[in-house]
Image: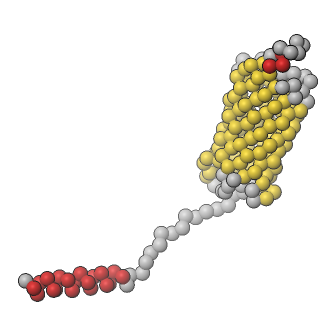
Amino acid sequence: MNKTIVALALALSTVSAAATDLPSKNSPAVPTATYGTLVSPNGYAGVNFGGAVKNGINTDAPWTVGVVGGYNVVKVGPLGFGVEGTYDYKEGNTQTVVGNGVASYAVGSFTPYVLAGVGYQWDKNGVTRPRRNAIDEKIFDVAAGLKYAFASNMEFDARYRRIENWDRTRSDDRATFGVNYKF
């Protein structure tokens, strides 16, 4: 019985010693490719400035300012799909908040994109300025734009947006230019 225990212990120690001499294998690294601005970083926040190209809301509002924030959720090669939120203030106190879905395609430092979304728009100045009606409505928007990465975490953003109310009785076309910080 003692010989069996000693033989078993010797066999186990030999197997474990042999296993320590095996070469270690690391799992292969996941291949990555850089496609413009879509690989990293994924989030962005920025400011923009522009003006009304065609204005169906109020005719005395030539400029608009806003903020944007978004995140690229899915990346397949140079294709990207993400979400973003925008807030715009247009001269004359028209304010717009929109949530958008964004599809983009990176080509080097340039990233053309299209977006569409829904939101809300209000302008309470119709009460104090009787020549205009107060606006309080649901809206949707569609847009096309182009981003240019001029640094690893900064990009220029130019876009053209069409904003319409749900019953399509009022529309607003806006062109804006901005700068985004990527994180």
* Residue 80 percent location from the top left of the image: 65, 48
Q: Nearer the viewer, residue 54 or 50?
A: 50
Q: Is residue 68 above or below residue 155?
A: above
Give the residue drawn at x 55%, y 64%.
Answer: 30
The quarter of the image holding the N terminus is bottom left
Where residue 54 sits, quadrant-wise, is: top right
* Residue 164 percent location from the top left of the image: 76, 24
Where residue 46 sits, quadrant-wise, is: top right
Let me know if residue 180 appears in the view: yes
Give the residue drawn at x 15%, y 86%.
Answer: 6
Q: Is residue 175 left or right of residue 40?
A: right
Q: Is residue 156 above or below residue 166?
A: below
Give the residue drawn at x 81%, y 48%.
Answer: 179
Q: Is residue 165 above or below residue 152?
A: above
Let me know if residue 132 appears in the view: no
Colour scheme in use: secondary structure
Residue extending farthest to the top is 130
* Residue 98 percent location from the top left of the image: 71, 32
* Residue 49 percent location from the top left of the image: 85, 39
Residue extending farthest to the left is 1
Q: Is residue 21 above or below residue 120?
A: below
Q: Is residue 156 left or right of residue 37?
A: right
Give the residue drawn at x 78%, y 30%.
Answer: 162
